[in-house]
Amino acid sequence: MDRILAIAGNTLRETNRNRVMYVLLLFAVLMILGSVTMGKLALRDPVILIKDLGLAAISLFGMIIAVYLGVTVVHRELEQKTVYFIIPKPLHRTEFLLGKFLGMCATLVIQITVMSSVFFMVLMAYGAGASVVLLKALVLTLAEMLVILSVALFLSSLTGPILAGFLSLALFVLGRSSEFMRQLATSGKTGWSAMDSLLNGAYYVLPDFHLFAVSGAITQRVSIHGNFFTWGYVGYACGYGALYITIMLGLTMLRLRRKDLV
């Protein structure tokens, strides 16, 4: 456990010194602040639009940060053999992978916390402030980012960072469309049974990011406006995310078993 925490702490320090992280965080903050201008131009309640844009900005840039971390951090360590300089002792693959993953998770938590703080300050300027509903939405957003992080980490063990990044983004888009794929497969509108089976299989295999989508009233399952989702739903979605993360880490471990880390 000491070695896992040591690797996690080292990963957290490295990522916090990365300028790319600060650039992405800056753009996220600017987009959240820009929602104020959009709110003034809105024909409906500006607070609703600010909430939508704020949560969308946190989700978008959180996803980009998660993919960037997942496809670069571990790949760079393995390619440059810098793991030997972290702990001068025999290191098990599980310790290495869990340590890096925990460090990246801590980085994501910090990034989401900073963006959420700016988001709440903007809302307080409009007299809205924080709420339990928004807290639930942010918890789901963080869970979603951890899932995409594990997916990107697994893909980076299969191929290079650039291709792994594109594949991670593609899986994120497909995962957000999982409900549409399921409805299309069950309705039989494709007119091709093989395609229906393929879509139905993809629905169960691909990560269901639609579970975590709560930004605005456009989602079919949950919304932050009017239809308040419960902590039970949040727990269910987080449980699904934890299961998928476990599977992805397990597959990554199987992929890295030929790497000489000891």
Image: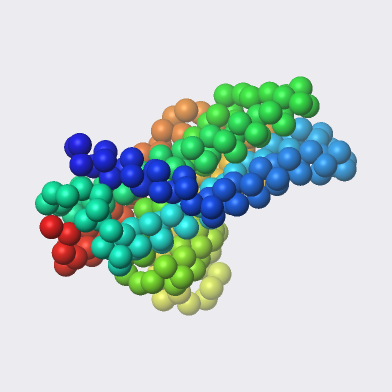
Q: Nearer the viewer, residue 54 or 205?
A: 54
Image position of 74 with respect to 128: above or below: below
Q: Residue at 59% of width from left, 51% of height from top?
A: 24
Q: Residue at 39% of width from left, 43% of height from top?
A: 12
Query: Looking at the image, what colour scheme do you see?
Result: rainbow
Residue 30 image-quadrant placement? top right
**Which quadrant, please, contains the C terminus?**
bottom left
Q: Does the rendering let one see residue 8?
A: yes
Q: Name the side, left or right, on which 217 lies relative to 164.
A: right
Residue 154 image-quadrant placement? bottom left
Q: Nearer the viewer, residue 206 or 88?
A: 88
Q: Residue at 41% of width from left, 61% of height from top?
A: 71
Number of numbered discs overlaid on the protein picture: 0
**Which quadrant, please, contains the N terminus?**
top left
Q: Does the rendering let one see residue 187?
A: no
Q: Residue at 17% of width from left, 59% of height from top?
A: 261
Q: Name the side, left or right, on which 24 lies relative to 166.
A: right
x, y (%) of residue 87?
A: 20, 48
x, y (%) of residue 162?
A: 46, 70
Q: Nearer the viewer, residue 175 or 11?
A: 11
x, y (%) of residue 20?
A: 54, 55
x, y (%) of residue 22?
A: 57, 48
